[in-house]
């Protein structure tokens, strides 16, 4: 083996060692960041019964949140699909200027969060879960 090939092999070996060291340092730093993020974000879990939808039926729809308006609409009538519910909420004055897809997403997310209050049937219609006495 001539000296040039030997020098190239040594250079490659040195490069590979440095790359491995950099990757290991990056992985260790990422793991540390993830660990710190988990400790910062930690908060006590909420019970499903403690999740309350605020609001009363006396306020105008323009002052209600999307989920409060959706609950009011569902309380007044029959189960509705998400699209129908979104259109009804917006037609009554809640988040009128917003994109209907954004309002539908907000309602769907809130209904999934408040799963102890809302349920969806096989046909995809949402309704309120009756309160147990």
Image: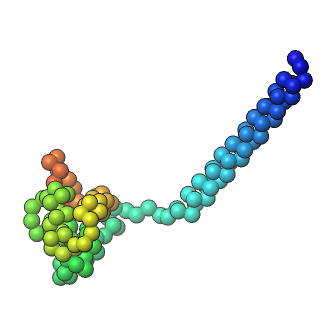
Q: Position of residue 40 (x, y in %)?
A: 57, 63
Image quarter of residue 2: top right
Q: Position of residue 8 (x, y in %)?
A: 82, 28
Image quarter of residue 45: bottom left
Q: Position of residue 39 (x, y in %)?
A: 58, 60
Q: Position of residue 105 (x, y in %)?
A: 29, 60
Dividing the image into 4 quarters, which one contains the N terminus? top right
Image quarter of residue 65: bottom left
Task: Answer above or below: position of 119 versus 10.
Answer: below
Q: Residue furthest top?
A: 1
Which scheme is used to colour this image of the protein?
rainbow
Task: Give me the residue at 19% from left, 69% from top.
Answer: 90
Task: Give me the residue at 65% from left, 53% from top.
Answer: 32
Between 19 and 127, the one nearer to me in the picture: 19
Dividing the image into 4 quarters, which one contains the C terminus? bottom left
Task: Answer above or below: position of 21 versus 117.
Answer: above
Residue 41 is left or right of residue 5, and the answer is: left
Task: Answer above or below: position of 21 versus 90.
Answer: above
Q: Residue furthest right?
A: 3
Residue 83 is left or right of residue 110, and the answer is: left
């Amino acid at each position: 083996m001539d000296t040039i090939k030997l020098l190239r092999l040594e250079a490659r070996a040195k490069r590979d060692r440095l790359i491995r060291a950099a990757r290991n340092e990056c992985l260790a730093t990422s793991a540390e960041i993830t660990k710190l993020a988990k400790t910062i974000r930690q908060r006590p879990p909420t019970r499903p019964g403690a999740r309350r939808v605020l609001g009363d039926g006396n306020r105008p729809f323009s002052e209600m949140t999307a989920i409060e308006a959706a609950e009011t609409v569902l309380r007044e009538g029959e189960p509705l699909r998400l699209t129908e519910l979104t259109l009804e909420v917006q037609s009554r004055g809640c988040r009128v200027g917003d994109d209907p897809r954004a309002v539908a997403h907000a309602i769907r997310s809130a209904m999934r969060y408040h799963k102890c209050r809302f349920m969806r049937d096989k046909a995809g219609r949402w309704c309120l879960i009756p309160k147990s006495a």
